[in-house]
Image (cartoon, rainbow, N blue to C red):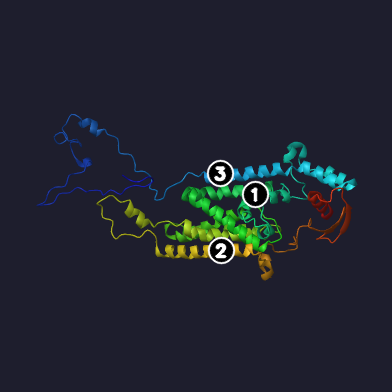
Amino acid sequence: MPRRGETAVVPIETGGGGGGGQDRPKSPRRRSHGPGHYGHGQGPNRHHHRSRPPPPPPPEFRPFRRWFPFLVPLFVVVNVALFVLSMYINDCPAHAQAAGAAIGGSVGEGAAAEGCWLEPELGRFAFQSYKENPLIGPSSATLLRMGALETSKITKDHEGWRLITCIWLHAGVVHILANMLSLLLIGIRLEKEFGFMRIGTLYVISGVGGSLLSALFMVSNISVGASGALFGLLGSMLSELITNWTIYENKFAALLTLVVIILINLAVGILPHVDNFAHLGGFTSGFFLGFVLLVRPQFGYINQKNSPLGFPTGTPKRKYKTYQIILWVIATVILISGFTIGLVLVLKGFNASEHCSWCHYLSCVPTSKWSCNAPSNYCMLSQLGNQLNLTCQSTGKTQTYTLNNPNNTEAIKHLCVGFCS
C-alpha cells in the first residue's frame, strides 16, 4: 500500500507470444470476449464488465509530507494579545495625571492636559503621545516592565530571560502590523513544508540570536520585536535552498529572487532608530539553523523507499548527499560555539561597539536626510531634593524644575520628553 502523500510504482506487462515458451496472459483490453473469468469471457456478466468505468487516476505524487499550519497563526495571536496587554498595563491617562501631579505648577498642569493619543475613544488603552512614541504604542517604561531587552538588566540584574521575552513584545501598532504580516507571509509557507516543530524551534532560536547580537552592540538602547526571528526565517530559506539544491527546478531564479528580498529587508535596517543588529543576528542564526533543521532526503532514496516489494530498484541510495552532511556538521559547530561565546560576552557586560569603530554603520548610515544620533528625548539630570536640573543631550539646553514628588520617575521622563521635543 502506498504511503500517505506518495504513490507506488507498478510495472506494466506487455502482451506478446513467443515460440517454445508459455504465453503471457494478455491485457484485459486486448481480449475479444471481455475480462471475465466465465469461460473465456462468455459468462453472464459479460456486458456488465464491458461497461465498467475506467479506473481513477493515481493520486498526486508528493514526496514530502504537507503540514497544516497552526503554530505561525498561534504566534500571531500571542504577539497581538501581548501588545493589547501592554497597552492595558501602560494606562497612559492614569500615568499622565500622576506625572502632572508630581511635577506641580503650570508645568504639571500642562503635562496632564497634554494627555494621551485617542484617550476619549480608547480609555486606558490610549497610546502615548506621538512625541514619546511615534510608533503608536506604550511607553518604554511599560515595555521594560514586561520584558524588553536592555543590556544592563542582563549584566547587572541577571535577567537573562529578557533575551527571549523581548521577541514577543512590540513598540507600537506600526511595529506589530509590519512584523505580523511578514510572519504570516513567510512562516505559513515554511510550516506547511517542514512542520511546526522545526519552524517553531527555528523561530525562537533565531530570535534569541538576534537578541544576543543586539545586546552586544546596542548597549544603551531598549529593544523589542520579532524582527530577529523573522530574519531567521529568511536566512533559513536561503540555506534550505542551498542544502536542497538538487530538488529545485529553477534553481538560479529562486536563488536570485530570495537574495534580492533579503538585501532589501537588510537595507531597511540602516535607517535611523532601527535595530539592524537584531536583524543580522537573527538572519545569521536562521541561516545556519536551516542547514541543521531543513535538510531534505534525496529523491533517489525516496523512490527506492516507496517502490513495491520485489521490484528491482538498482543500487541502494543514501538518504543524504555528502555535501548535506558536511554542511550539517559545520553549521552545528558554528551555532553551538557562536551562541556560547555570545552569551558569555553578554553576561560579562562586553560592549562590542567600543572594539569596532565601523560596526555602527551596520545599523545606521547617516545621510543628508537623517542623522544617526541618539533620539532627542535623552536627558542628563542632576537632582537635589525637590530641585531637578535637566540637560537635553541632543540640544545641550538646560532647565531647572521644582517637583512636588521628586521620586516619580514617570514625571521626570515626561519632563524630558517635553523639554527635548
* Mark number displayed over residue 12: none
Q: Please say if 193 is above or below 47.
A: below
Q: Amino acid at mark 3?
A: Leu
Quadrant the N terminus occupies:
top left
Q: Residue at x 78, y 41 (%)?
A: 94
Q: Position of residue 346 (x, y in %)?
A: 63, 62
User: Tag 3 or tag 2, which sits nearer the N-term?
Assistant: 3
User: Tag 1 or tag 3, which sits nearer the N-term?
Assistant: 3
Relative to 85, is 52 on the left or the right?
left
Q: Residue furthest right?
A: 106
Under circle 2, the secondary element is helix
Q: Amino acid at mark 1?
A: Leu
Q: Amino acid at mark 2?
A: Thr
Q: Which image quadrant for residue 116?
A: top right
* Mark number displayed over residue 74: 3
User: Tag 2 or tag 1, which sits nearer the N-term?
Assistant: 1
Judge whether residue 397 can be spotted in this image. yes
Q: Residue furthest top?
A: 44
